[in-house]
């Protein structure tokens, strides 16, 4: 069944794409959820309009992400956490903590899902953390973890 996607659907396509999907998937998920409409002969104009709108929003978002990346490039983000005598933290610092610290120190709103940490930070020190602000727009910030007094 051919449908016109009204939203981005992971693994299927993006807004404005006309895709062929299984009939059951369309009838049971895409159509009732309002994420797609049945592709008839007259929807090509609507699909083109949706793609143009998507491209404009994407360009605007990419521009905003690039300006945020210039602000964050090479920034040192201080984070204070309770630590033991050997420098080991009581708990850990995760992506949400890093996003909150970036918001507090630089005023840049970053979603925690865009902070790429291989594992939580569990000791005092300096760590390089990648922040992916948009697809293809990433920057590295240094997170400086100090013991709380």
Image (cartoon, rainbow, N blue to C red):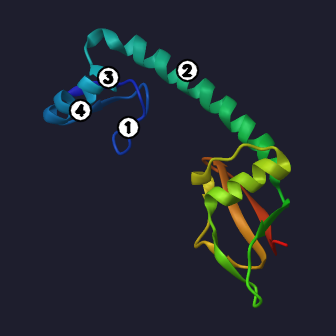
Q: Distance of mark 1 from mark 3, alpha carbons?
A: 12 Å
Q: Is residue 38 visible?
A: yes
Q: Distance of mark 4 from mark 1, alpha carbons?
A: 11 Å
Q: Nearer the viewer, residue 146 or 66?
A: 146
Q: Residue at x 76, y 56 (%)?
A: 101
- Mark 2 and mark 3 lie on one chain; the one further toward the N terminus is 3
User: Closer to the observer: label 4 or label 1?
Assistant: 4
User: Closer to the observer: label 1 or label 2?
Assistant: 1
The disc at residue 53 is 2
**Secondary structure of residue under mark 2:** helix
> Residue placed farthest to the front in the image?
149
User: Closer to the observer: label 1 or label 3?
Assistant: 3
Q: Which residue is mark 3?
A: 34
Q: Do the residues under discs 1 and 3 have CB atoms within 8 angstroms?
A: no
Q: Which residue is mark 4?
A: 29
Q: Residues within 10 Å of mark 2 (few under 14, many from 20)?
A: some
Q: Is residue 116 visible?
A: no
Q: Do the residues under discs 3 and 4 have CB atoms within 8 angstroms?
A: no
């Amino acid at each position: 069944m051919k449908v016109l996607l009204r939203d981005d659907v992971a693994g299927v396509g993006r807004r404005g794409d006309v895709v062929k999907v299984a009939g059951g998937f369309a009838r049971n998920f895409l159509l009732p959820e309002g994420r797609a409409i049945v592709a008839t002969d007259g929807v090509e104009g609507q699909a083109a309009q949706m793609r143009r709108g998507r491209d404009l929003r994407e360009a605007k978002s990419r521009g905003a992400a690039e300006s945020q990346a210039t602000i964050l490039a090479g920034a040192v983000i201080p984070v204070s956490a309770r630590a033991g005598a050997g420098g080991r933290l009581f708990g850990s610092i995760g992506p949400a903590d890093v996003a909150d610290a970036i918001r507090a120190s630089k005023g840049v709103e970053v979603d925690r899902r865009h902070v790429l940490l291989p594992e939580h930070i569990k000791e005092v020190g300096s760590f390089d953390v990648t922040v992916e602000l948009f697809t293809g727009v990433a920057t590295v910030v240094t997170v400086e973890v100090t013991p709380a007094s």
